[in-house]
Amino acid sequence: MAKCIKDGVWDVDLPECIENKRTQLLIDKFNRSVYSADLPPTDTGVGVHITIAGAINAVISLDESVPSILTDVSIELHWNDPRLSWTPSSYGDLTSITLNHIKVWTPHMSLAGSADKGFAGLPEVDVTVNHDGEIIWAFETLLETQCSLNHFLFPFDDMTCPVCLHVRNTSGEALRCPTSQLNKQFDVIDCEELRETVAGEWYTAYGMAVDSYKGCLNINLDRSPKQHMCTTVAPGVILALLFCIIFFIPIDNGDRLSFGMAILLSMFVTLLVISDFLPRSSDIPFFGILNIVAIVLMGFFMLVTTVLINLHGKDDDMPSWMRSFFLRGCSRVLLLGDLTKQSGANVGKLDEKANVTYENPAIESDLKADDLINKDTAIQSFIEEEESSTMQGIAKDMSKTVRALKTSVLLLKNMVQEEPDKRNEWMMLTYVLDRMCFVLYVSGMILIPLAFLM
């Protein structure tokens, strides 16, 4: 209360009328004027040109099995709404105000290629309105988007992850690149700038690309191959090389099968490690193809090894075509020489001119298996001598009996020598086949993967 005493004098100080220019601006623009946040600022009939700029603050995570990327991004959207312009001098030199985004018209934008099932739209943050009608919608958020991974040359592969916002073009909205005069609130880039950073094992470079309906932060990632070369590629290559050792282990050694099976199982483990972090797609990386080829070849040559073990102890007669083809032809191609000269096949052949005499016991004791080449002639000679001899006493009969026993022992020794010769031929055959398997394994490991690169 204020009481007038006399002559216009009041008992208290009179109140001073102070006007809130910010409140007055809001009243003038939203209460006294016909402004609707549902209608776009298209009074000029040329549509709404929206300037978009952005930056990648950090790469939070990469999921190569999808593949997808989670990034911390800063986005700025600038457009002009002439309905919200004012003269600063009329409102206490006020040049900008901050408003709730629901009070003004904002473009309808969505995230292209979203990999986030819980994505509910862009964040609802306040907008800044300048006196000339420029509206700035700047926000920082986490966006998860899909990527395109070219993993054929893993671990020398690369990945492209576009983080794109596009407009629905319901009111003639059109996007454009920022200019150098843009009033930036964040450290965003324009379409001319390129930035690089490191995200874990990836070298990251990104730039801005804008067309009429889409604005993208294109992220290009190149993998650093050092870790995977040491932990994934090198073990697989070493295992493939170690498998060559089984071709140098004696065929009749039981460790050959156990060693090969251990390497084969290790290759399966390596293949599982690769498939854990690569995407499920129809394209198999080159190193995965190399592993599969190695597993198939290892399994095949393990089966061949069991066949060679059975052939190694065989004692049947070898067909002449097999002896000629493998022991003479293939062995020369494999740089083993003519194995028919080393197989002992000629040893034990019959010699019709060989004779055995028993007149001198000292000579009989020195008889060797090679002196009894013709067994039939030796036996016949012995029988004729026995028939022509006469009984001259018990001592002479015993002497002849001893000589006959010696002859039988030498004949038996000659018969026994024929068996190693047959086994020797089969052993030579297994050596040829084993060398052939080694050449085929090395050739297959080189030529089959190279066929996929062409």
Image: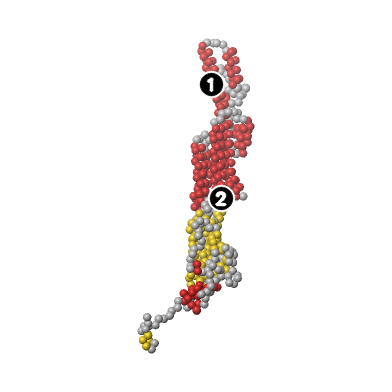
Q: Is residue 397 above or below residue 191?
A: above
Q: Is residue 348 above or below residue 201?
A: above
* Mark linked to residue 118: none
Disc 1 residue crowd, few under 14, some 14–19, many 20+, Cα 10 Å: few
In the figure, residue 206 lies in which quadrant? Answer: bottom right
- Quarter of the picture containing the N terminus is bottom left
Residue under pointer 2: 281
**What colour scheme governs how the chains and residues are painted in the rendered image of this protein?**
secondary structure
Percent coordinates x, y for residue 84 in the rendering? 53, 73
Instruction: Report the side of 125 relative to 44 (left or right).
Output: left
Q: CA distance from mark 2 to mark 1?
A: 74 Å
Label 1 SS: helix
Front: mark 2 or 1: 2
* Mark linked to residue 409: 1
Percent coordinates x, y for residue 351 in the rendering? 61, 24
Q: Which is nearer the N-term, disc 2 or disc 1?
A: 2
Q: Residue at x 52, y 34 (%)?
A: 252
Q: Residue at x 56, y 11 (%)?
A: 390
In front: 57, or 70? 70
Q: Is residue 360 above or below residue 121?
A: above
Q: Residue at x 57, y 68 (%)?
A: 48
Q: Amino acid at mark 2?
A: Ser
Q: Residue at x 56, y 41 (%)?
A: 297
In front: 418, or 85? 85
